[in-house]
Image: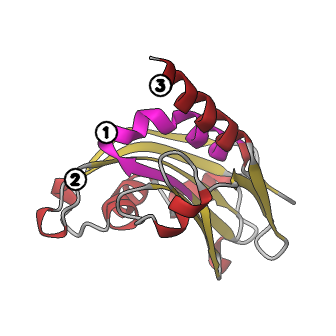
Amino acid sequence: MALTAALTLAQAQSIAETKAFDSDQYRYSVTLPAGCRHEEGPGTLDAVCAADFDPDKSAMASAAAALVLELGVEPVPEDAGKAPAELAQHYDEAQFKAEMPENVCGEADNTRVKVENVKQVVEEARVAYTADVTCPEIKFLGLGERRAAVEVFVTPGLRYRLMARAPKEDFEQHKEAVAAFFASFRIHP
């Protein structure tokens, strides 16, 4: 019992230590746990985190078997200047759901991926979509079932996708880190 409490305290301290990322080009800021491996690419930012957020373990962790926090930005020039109602017609709930299997799970067969709790909110300057996703087991790769939370923000000219994914059995223990990741995301004018 004392070992579990010590581990939980160590995880909470590791989660509290964050690193801020800002992109002037894509007009966003976000914070990620400092104990994760951070990988940046054109329009992408990923954090691969060991279960205890240890930097050395995170450096070696497989993205398939760890907590992954991901931010992707897609320029959509044809949406520039559109009002949120128009954005929601151009990228609707059906398209959002259709992209989840490939974008979140790497799965081409849509019937194998469970997408639940889908919500669309048309806001003053953007459209927001959220969903919970269950990715199937991939036996030949040795991957068990994975769970994910996804948020997509459609703005005039840019589409942002935030995703947090972990093995099914580990997802609940990372709820605090996942919530902090989503809450830290800001789009700048």
The residue under label 1 is 169
Residue 5 is labelled as none
> Mark 3 is on which residue type?
Thr
Residue 99: percent from left, percent from top: 38, 63
Residue 144 is labelled as 2
Q: Farthest bottom residue?
A: 42
Pick whichever, 133 or 56, lies toward us: 56
Q: Secondary structure at mark 2?
A: loop
Against 144, residue 105 (above or below) is below
Q: How dense is the environment of label 3, judged by Cα within 10 Å: few (below 14), some, or many (20 and up)?
A: few
Against 83, residue 122 (above or below) is above
Q: How dense is the environment of label 2, judged by Cα within 10 Å: few (below 14), some, or many (20 and up)?
A: some
Q: Is residue 19 left or right of residue 47?
A: right
Residue 17: percent from left, percent from top: 74, 46
Q: Which residues are magenta?
A: 162-183
Sequence-earlier tag: 3 or 2: 3
Queried whether the magenta region covers residue 143, the answer comes back as no
The residue under label 3 is 4
Pick whichever, 120 or 163, lies toward us: 163
Q: Secondary structure at mark 3?
A: helix
